[in-house]
Amino acid sequence: MELPGPLRRSRDWVDHVARASPARLALMVFATIIVLVTALLSLPAATAGGQRAPIADALFTATSAVCVTGLVTVDTATYWSPFGQAVILVAIKVGGLGVMTLASILGLAVSRRIGLTQRMLAATETKTTRLGEVGTLVRAVVVASLVVELALSIVLVPRFLSLGESFGQALWHGVFMALSIFNNAGFVVLEGGLAPFVGDWWMGLPIVLGTVVGAVGFPVILNVARTWRSPRRWSLHTKLTLVTYGALAAASTVAIAALEWVNPRTMGGLPVHEKILTSLISGVNSRSSGLSTIDVGDMREATWFLQDALMFVGGGSASTAGGIKVTTFAVLVLAIVAEARGDRDVEAFGRRIGSPTVRLAVAVAFLGSTLVGGGTLLLLMLTDLHLDVLLFEVISAFATVGLSTGITGQLPDSGKYVLTALMFAGRTGTMTLAAALAIRHRRRVIRLPAERPVIG
């Protein structure tokens, strides 16, 4: 079927941009969706009071939702109307799927097939190495997200019903929280937040499990689903992700429990079983989800520093989590170990990791550090707040986590714009940098003489 002239020209223009610079197209699509969500949240119908939301708050909330972060300048449950909350929920779903994956879904629905351009774009977002797998992976993304979100909803809706809520209210709360949990979005539509559920295993365990599934990444989910009976056949990416994520989650759970166990402002007054649940939630929420049953602002500064490191690492590639990703962290650690041992190659699980991958990991980590450092410096100049709370907020924004010490709403509009830019850069920056560098392979006939500068 022949498309009308304007649509055909638009398609051709998109195809041209996609071939010339997939990373640029990714930025444009993300920005366009954020602008649309901002416009919807700026409508009087989006707020509970019927007034227009300030542009800084509307833009901040839209970016936080599309980038599945969870940082907020106004209370989601009380400030936004049901329409505004619905807009936020749709933005979370779009951001969680990934805009490039969504583009492939739309292309598949319209043309019954995925073209080469769409395959290239989806491969950029989902980190698929073979273009032939993108169609399968796109379907897996949709099915996996719907199945997990449905399962979480089935578990959570009865919990809200048991609290005396009407069926409609319980259904809304259950579905909203299910999508927020799996997409690691960090938004809470409950008045009073999650504090009333600090010792509630019915609420806490789905948060832990849903966060982990959403944070390991869709390629891992697909690989495990295909070969779950034969772990030896898992890809190197899957093994690195699961081992590194599991080790960090276990270590952070124990470390946070040790730091906060007797803190009277957080876990100190809780029974042992509630302390265990709170530690489990804290062990995974600082990696991506941002959902917390205790006030982060009441934690010790040592705990903040630990969470800074955990948030910066983040979750799995092509997941709803942010950060530089656990595989980047794993490759850097393996490179350090290989250098310390004097090994020629970086190896893991019987496989050699090539030097281009190591260089890419260094570039992504350096970009992340630069963004965090620059954002912190700007906020130090714009506010009178201390370094510890500002650094925590900046890393939470860059890593799209959503944990906060409570200063987000106190920031001036200029500070809110800084965090907005960090959320956008954190969601798209490392992805587009990796895509841009991965396709820049230059073959040089003449190589310059080698010489080693002094390091360290």
Image (cartoon, rainbow, N blue to C red):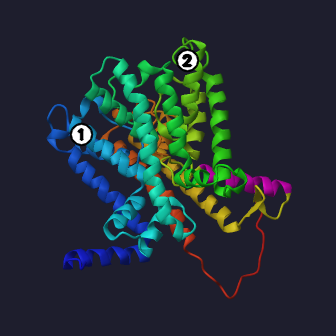
Q: Can residue 174 be seen in this snapshot?
A: yes
Q: Residue at x 46, y 42 (%)?
A: 148
Q: Quadrant of residue 437?
A: bottom right
Mark number, residue 200? none
What residue is shown with label 1? 84
Instruction: Tell whether 317 sits left or right of 168.
Output: right
Per the rendered image, the range of residues in magenta is 326-341
What crowding class fits label 2: few (fewer than 14 Cα within 10 Å), some (14-19), or many (20 or more)?
A: some
What crowding class fits label 1: few (fewer than 14 Cα within 10 Å), some (14-19), or many (20 or more)?
A: many
Q: Main secondary structure of the magenta part?
A: helix
- Inspect the image, locate mark 2, and give the three-letter code of the amino acid beneath it: Glu
State the SS at label 1.
helix
Residue 340 shown in magenta: yes
Distance between the alpha carbons at the discs numbered 1 and 2: 34 Å
Q: Residue at x 34, y 22 (%)?
A: 161
| 312, 10: nearer the viewer | 10
Q: Quadrant of the C terminus?
A: bottom right
Q: Position of residue 210 (x, y in %)?
A: 50, 37
Q: Quadrant of residue 192?
A: top left
Q: Residue at x 67, y 62 (%)?
A: 358
**Residue reaching furthest to the right:** 342
Q: Can residue 295 be seen in this snapshot?
A: no
Vertical arrangement, residue 276 with respect to residue 3, above or below: above
State the SS at label 2.
helix
Instruction: Tell whether 66 sits left or right of 132.
Output: left
What residue is shown with label 2? 274
Vertical arrangement, residue 6 with respect to residue 106, above or below: below
Residue 299 shown in magenta: no
Q: Position of residue 11 (x, y in %)?
A: 30, 75
- Inspect the image, locate mark 1, and give the three-letter code of the amino acid beneath it: Gly
Q: Position of residue 309 (x, y in %)?
A: 60, 40
